[in-house]
Image: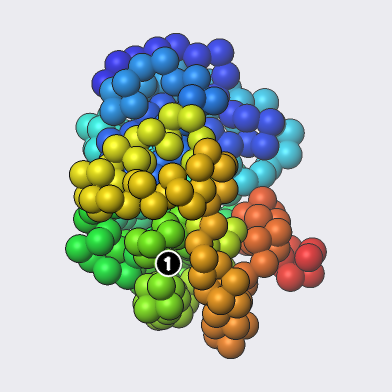
Amino acid sequence: MHFTKVKGILSSKNGMNLFRGCTHGCIYCDSRSKCYQMNHKFEDIEVKENGIILLEESLKRKRKKCMIGLGSMTDPYIRDELQLNYTRKALELINRYGFGVTLITKSANVLRDLDLLKEINSKTKCVIQMTLTTYDEELCKKIEPNVSTTKERVEVLKILRDEGIPTVVWLTPILPFINDTKENILGILNYCKEANVFGIICFGMGLTLRDGNREYFYYQLDKQFPNLKERYIREYGNSYVANSKNNKTLTALFHEFCEQHNIVHDNEAIFNYLKLFEEKNCSKQISFFDEV
């Protein structure tokens, strides 16, 4: 872990990453791609030491309340966060200044801040996004080795459900020849139904590979799935998108399941929902479905 000072913290779309790099060890991680110009070892977490100060300055200046996003590139609940408390400090500011929040994580550590998430959600809107890729716990430990297992994440979703905090699941990536099966997709979808998630984001069944993350992915395939790298090279070469041969069938299954169980499955509609700020103490609440 090392510290650096940055010039700004919020993007033009009000998203932020307090850290760069990750220790989760997910074998498919796109954030390893060279295009992001991370000039340090990926597991050596770069902490934006002035990020909290910059966030407060930005929130004070904003004339209009909005949703603030955390974790598009680095999970806000990486292991080091439990000592740093940067994510918690950010949530405290978001709560203090009356903004909404949405964050993406794979970690059950998000429950550490359940008190703040509930308070934010009581006044505005708090949406927790959780990535689920595999129903099989042993497979999960292979492809996402240093983070909460699928069952642990699902338990988080259920706790959030019971607390009235809306959730969205990212069903991605689905790795060809590894977890691109009907059994896996249905297992995850049934978890989502049990947890009463608001929506599921899915870009099809496959993954993206580019310089940086491709090399790491292939290195991990050699360790965890002998001879599979050669099959990937034969099937996909240097293609950016590696779609599963089962893409059409599994994608149809996904949409049919969501339709049957009233789970939002249109990506654009979900992203609009995540961006829409709501004030729950207003005399007239804004309804997402009125806006779409």
Left or right, 268 with reference to 199: right
**Above-or-below relation of 216 to 192:** above
The amino acid sitting under disc 1 is: Asp
**Above-or-below relation of 267 to 248:** above
Q: Residue at x 48, y 25 (%)?
A: 34
Q: Position of residue 280 (x, y in %)?
A: 63, 61
Q: Position of residue 152 (x, y in %)?
A: 26, 63
Q: Residue at x 45, y 49 (%)?
A: 234
Q: Position of residue 174 (x, y in %)?
A: 45, 60
**Above-or-below relation of 18 to 8:** below
Q: Residue at x 23, y 65 (%)?
A: 137
Q: Nearer the viewer, residue 230 or 204?
A: 230
- Visible residue check, residue 120: no
Quadrant the N terminus occupies: top left
Q: Nearer the viewer, residue 135 or 10?
A: 135
The residue at the far right in this view is 291
**Above-or-below relation of 77 to 227:** above
Q: Position of residue 194 (x, y in %)?
A: 40, 80
